[in-house]
Image (cartoon, rainbow, N blue to C red):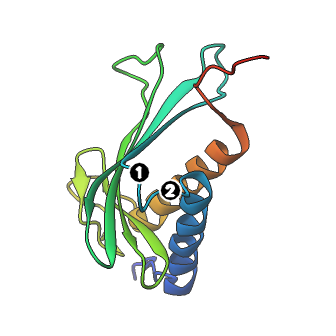
Amino acid sequence: MTNRYIYIPDLIADMAECDANYIRLSQLFPEMDSEDDLTFGIKTRTEEGATVIIRITERCPFTTMLTVNVSAEEDSPFIRWPNIDVRIYHDVRSAEVVRFERHRNFRFRYPTPNVNMFQPDEKSQINKFFGELLTHCIEHGYSLEPVALS
């Protein structure tokens, strides 16, 4: 007899994460309705830190698409920040990752093993990662604009 683990998505927790990501994005980018992009720095383990660009790519009456790009001067082909596309649902106040690097349209559950080597809860993990990135930006972000001293 084979003992197989079957992953059962926790839809309530997954929706709560997407709702929290909407709130985090609203804190970071309060002018999202009128501005097309936001650029700021974040502190990292390196002295240079990293630059975050949040760019609106599409606006519709109830949804907004945006891209989050994080880059650092020390980026290498082996270690680099991912590019993330996010769909924001304004009517339900939720934000969901729809593309992570080259992968899009994630399923709630993946069989294992699978061709792409996704974890059974890949979609959930990606939205949690996005939440952690946004939290890091809120806690360690800083303006790249020079401050005029009078």
Query: Dot 1 surroundings within 10 Å: few (below 14), some, or many (20 or more)?
Result: few
Image marks 1 and 2: residues in contact by CB distance under 8 Å: yes
Is any part of residue 24 visible from this angle? yes
Q: Is residue 29 left or right of residue 59?
A: right
| Rendered position, 41 above or below 100 | above
Quadrant containing the N terminus is bottom left
The outermost residue toward the right is 150
Q: Nearer the viewer, residue 67 or 33?
A: 33
How far is mark 1 from mark 2, CA to CA?
6 Å
Q: Residue furthest left?
A: 115
The amino acid sitting under disc 1 is Glu
Please tell me which residue lies in front, 120 or 95: 95
Residue 31, which numbered label?
2
Give x and y (percent) for residue 3: 45, 78
Q: Amino acid at mark 2?
A: Glu
For the point 56% across and 71% down, the residue is: 17
Nearer to us in this view, 10 or 92: 92
Q: What is the tally of numbered marks visible in this picture?
A: 2
Q: Quadrant of residue 119?
A: bottom left
**What residue appears at the point 40 percent right and 62 percent down from the top-left corner?**
122
* Residue ID at (59%, 67%): 23
Q: Tell whether 66 sits left or right of 114.
A: right
Position above or below: 150 against 21: above
Q: Which residue is mark 1?
A: 35
Whether residue 112 can be seen here: no
The x, y position of residue 38, in whole percent, is: 46, 42
Estimate the x, y position of residue 48 in percent, counting from the top left.
60, 14
Question: Which quadrant is the C terminus positioned in?
Answer: top right
Q: Nearer the viewer, residue 31 or 97?
A: 31
Please provide percent x and percent y for residue 118.
33, 57
